[in-house]
Amino acid sequence: MQLAVWTYEGPPHVGAMRVATAMEKLHYVLHAPQGDTYADLLFTMIERRGKRPPVTYTTFEARDLGKDTAQIFQDAAREAVTRFNPQAIIVGASCTAELIQDDPAGLAEAMGLPCPAIPLELPSYQRKENWGAAETFYQIVRALADRSLKREPREGRKARANILGPTALGFRHRDDLVEIRKILSALDIEVNLVAPLGATPEDIARIGAADFNIVLYPEIGDEASRWLERTFAQPCVRTVPIGVGATRSFIADVAELAGADPTPALGDTSSRMPWWSRSVDSTYLTGKRVFIFGDATHAVAAARIAREELGFEVCGLGCYAREFARDVRAEAARCGVEPLITDDHLAVEDAIAEAMPELVLGTQMERHIAKRLGIPCAVISAPVHVQDFPARHSPQMGFEGANVIFDTWVHPLVMGLEEHLLTMFREDFEFSDEAGASHHAAHSPRKATPEPVPFVSSEVGTQVEAPVSGLSTALETNGEWAGSLWTAEAERELKKIPFFVRGKARRNTEAFAAADGRRQIDLDTLYDAKAHYAR
Amino acid sequence: MSALATLEGCAAEVAREDRPDDAPRPILRERGQREVFCGLTGIIWLHRKMQDAFFLVVGSRTCAHLLQSAAGVMIFAEPRFATAIMEERDLAGMVDAQDELDRVVNRLLERRPDIKTLFLVGSCPSEVIKLDLAKAAQRLGAVHMPRVRILNYSGSGIETTFTQGEDACLAALVPVMPARPADAPAELLIVGSLPDIVEDQFLRLFAQLGLTRVGVLPARNARDLPGVGPNTRYLLAQPFLGETAMALEGRGARRIEAMFPFGAEGTSDWLRAAARAFGIDATHTEQVIAAPRARAERALANLRPQLAGKRITFLPDSQLEVPLARFLQDELGMELVEVGTPYLHRAHLARELDRLGPAVRLSEGQHVERQLDRVRADRPDITVCGLGLANPLEMEGLTTKWAIELVFSPIHGFDQAADLAELFARPLRRRDLLEV
C-alpha cells in the first residue's frame, strides 16, 4: 500500500482514454463502476474539449455484482457500437472491474461485433497512465496495421514519415505537431500518418506505408515504434526536438533517413532563441540555479536547454516515470547531480526545499510546491492543468518551441537590472523582493505564508489560484481605518468571506453604507449591501 | 411512494403527456451509463468542514486521481485527505492488506499529530475484495484512542453516488454521538454540512426564534459531536441524507418535516417547521423571519426578469435537483423541463414534490445517452449537468450550469438565495453578452 496525496499519473485506463480520445472513429468500452466517469472531465474541462471522450462506461453497481455484470458489459458494448458506429473498439477494465474478472476481451470476441474489438490488458495495480497509453497504442497498431502492405519503391516519390505519440491531454502536443509538420514540409517529406492524434482505425491500417517513423513522445510512442521497426523494417527517429540543439539534431536525423538536404529546415529565420540568449540582457541568467522535474523526456530536454542554451546551473533533476529513468540518470550524471526518481510528490517537495533553486521547472505539482516556497516556476511537463492549454500557439518543439521556452522560463525571473535595484533598495516598501518582479501583474512569487483556505471554491475543476491582491491585503491590515466603521460582529462575519473576494465585499459594503447614510456597519448593513449588489 | 407510478425505460413521451391533476406522477426510471461522481468526492468538502478530521481512502490509483481531478484544490500543501493505494501485493492476501493498512495509518498519524478523527473510507476495489474496514477501524482505534478516534464508511461508486458519500460519513458519526437521556430538554439538531457562514446565519436565526439548544451535524470539530436522544428533533439541511436520518431515528431522534432551505420560501418553511416543532409562537416566528425574508425577496426580484420563463433541465448529480427545481420554478418563474436525480427520497422530498407541476418530467437514475437525446430534443435554455458534459453541450449550442458548483457554494438560507439564483442567471447572461 502506498500513501499518496497527489499522483503524477492516473491509472492505466486513463492512458487508454488519452489514446481513444485523440483518435477518430474509435470507441472505448470500459468495464467500470459508476464514478469512474470522472475521467471525462479531464478532457472536457482541463483540455476544454468540446466533445465527450468516446468512452462507454458500464457503470455497474454493488447490486449488480451478485448478478450478471458480464451481461451489463455486453449490453453496453452492443449499444455503443450501434449508437456510435465506430470503425473499431477497444475493450478493457478499470481497477475495480479487473477484480471481478469478467474478461471483457473474451466477452467482446464472443459477441461477433461488426467491427474489430481490440482487447486491452492494463494491470491497474502495477502500472500507470503513460504505460497504459503506450500499451493501448501498441495494441491498436498491432491489431489494425495491414501487414501485407508493401512499400512502394522510393524512386520517383517523396519520402514518407509517420509521426507517433501525440495524444489527448498531452502537454502542448497540438502545437508541437504544427512545428514538426513545418520541419517535414521544409525537408519535402510527406506525412503518411499522425497517430494517435487525429487518426482513424482505417488510417492505422496503412501505417506500414511510411519509410520511417518519428517518435515525438517516447513515453507513448516507443513501444509501438519498436514493433513497427521489427514488422515493417521502418527505422525510427528518436531525437526529441525540444531546444535549439535538439531541433538541429532532429532535422539532421530526419534528413538523413529521408535522403534530403537539411539546409532549408536548419535555416529557419524565426529561430530567435540563440540571439535572445546571447544578447547582453541575458547575462544575468548565467548560473541561475534551476531544479527540474517531470516526465523523462521533457525533464531531460529541459536539463539540456538549461545547461547548454541558457547557461543555467542544474541543481536538481528527476522524473516520475520509472520506465524511462535511465535517460534521466544519464543526464543527471552530465549535470553532476543525483537523479531523483520518484512518484512521491512529498519527496520532490523536500528535494526542492533543500536545493533552494532560483527557478523550478516542473509539472503542476512542482508549480504548487514552488508557489508555496515562493520560488519562480514554469511548467515543462504533464501532469498539467487548464492554464497549460493556452489558446495561443505555444509549442515546445522546433525552433518556435525554443522561442516559447525562452520566454516562458525567463518570464518568472526578476529581470537583470531590476535584480540589482532590489538588492540596493531592499527596504523600500513598494520595491522590495517581496513585491516580486515589476513586470508581473498579478502572480508574482512571494514569501511563503500560510494561505487562508476558503470552505468553497466556486471554480472547481479549473483550479483557481488565489490572486495576491495587494489592495485587499493593505485594507485587511489597516486595522485603525477599517475598525472605525465596522462592528466587531460584522468584522468577524467579513472574515468568513473567502479572502479573494473579501476586499471587494468590504469596499462594496462601505460604499453602500456611505450612500445609505449609515454611520456604522453592522451585520444587517453587510447583508443589506450584499442584497443591494446582487444582480 | 405507492401513489407514484413508475415508467420503464425510455418512456419520456408518456411522461410528457398531459394528465389529469390527480393522476399519479410518472417517474422515468432508467438504467444505463451514469455520468456521476462516486461518494468519495464528498471528502473534498467534508475535510474542510471538519477541521480535526482526516479522510484516508483505501483504494486504487483511480481513487487518488479522482480526488485530485475533482478537487482542483492542489493549492493546499497537504490536505486532510489521502489515498492508501492498493498494489498487486496487497491483493495477494487479506492479512497482508490489513497489516499494510496498519503501517500506513501509523505513519500518517505520526506525521499528523493534529488529526483527532480518522475516517477509513472504503472504495470500489476495497469493497469488491471485501477488505473489512470496520474491523480495521476497531483494531486501530484500540491502539490510538483516546488521541484519535477511528471510524469507517464507504464512499465507493458501487454503493454511493456523489453526495451519498456525505450521507455515509454522517451516518458513521451517529453511533458515536453522546447519548442524551430521555428526560433531557428538547433539542434541535441541524443535519448536513453547511458552509460555516451559512451555519452561523441559521444559528443566529434560531437564537432569535428562542431556540438555544441547537446542535449541528457534522460539527466543525468532529470530536465535539452534539448529543442525540429521544428528545432530539432533527431538521435536514440537505436532501441527500437518507441513511443518516435512519441512523438518527434509530437513536430516538425524530425528523421535522419541512421543505429544504433554498430560496425565501424554502428557508421560511424550514424555519417555521422548526419553530412549530418547539412550540414557538407563530407571530414571533413571522417577526423574526420578516426582515431577512424581505431582503431575500428584494435580491431575488433583481434576478427574476433574467430567469422567468426560461426552460431548465437538470441531469442527475447531487440529489439537490428537486428542491432547487422547486425554488427556480416557484420563486423565479422558470419552467422545469426535466428534473433528473440519481435517487429520489420520496419521504424527505414529499413537500418539495408537491410543489412541482404535473407536467414536470421526473427521472431517477440515468442512461446518459438517452438523457442527452432528450436534452437535444427539448433544447432547454439551460441544462444543469456534470463537468464531463458541460463543454460538449455548450459546443452543441446548449447553455449549461456546472452542477458541482451547487454543492461547493453557499446556497442555503435567505442571504444566499440571490447567490443561488445568480448561479443560473450568469451562464444565460454570458450567452447573451458574448459576440464571438
Image (tube, grey):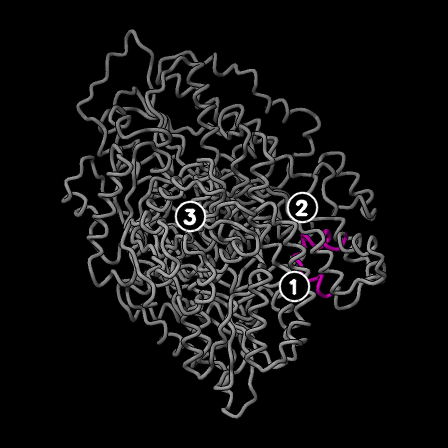
Q: Position of residue A530 (x, y in %)?
A: 70, 56
Disc 2: which residue? A445
Q: Chain of mark 3?
A: A
Report how many numbered discs are placed on residues in the image. Answer: 3
Q: Secondary structure at mark 3?
A: loop
Q: Is residue A438 magenta?
A: no
Badge 3: residue crowd in 10 Å (few <14, some 14–19, many ≥20): many
Badge 2: residue crowd in 10 Å (few <14, some 14–19, many ≥20): many
Disc 1: which residue? B293
Which image quarter holds the N terminus of chain A?
A: bottom left
Badge 1: residue crowd in 10 Å (few <14, some 14–19, many ≥20): many
What's the amino acid at mark 3? Glu
The reply, left or right, for residue B132 in relation to residue A411 is left
- State whether residue B274 appears in this view: yes
Kindly indicate whether the residue at mark 1 contacts the one at mark 3 (C-beta within 8 angstroms).
no
What's the amino acid at mark 2? Pro
Q: Which mark is residue B308?
A: none
Front label number (2 vs 1): 1
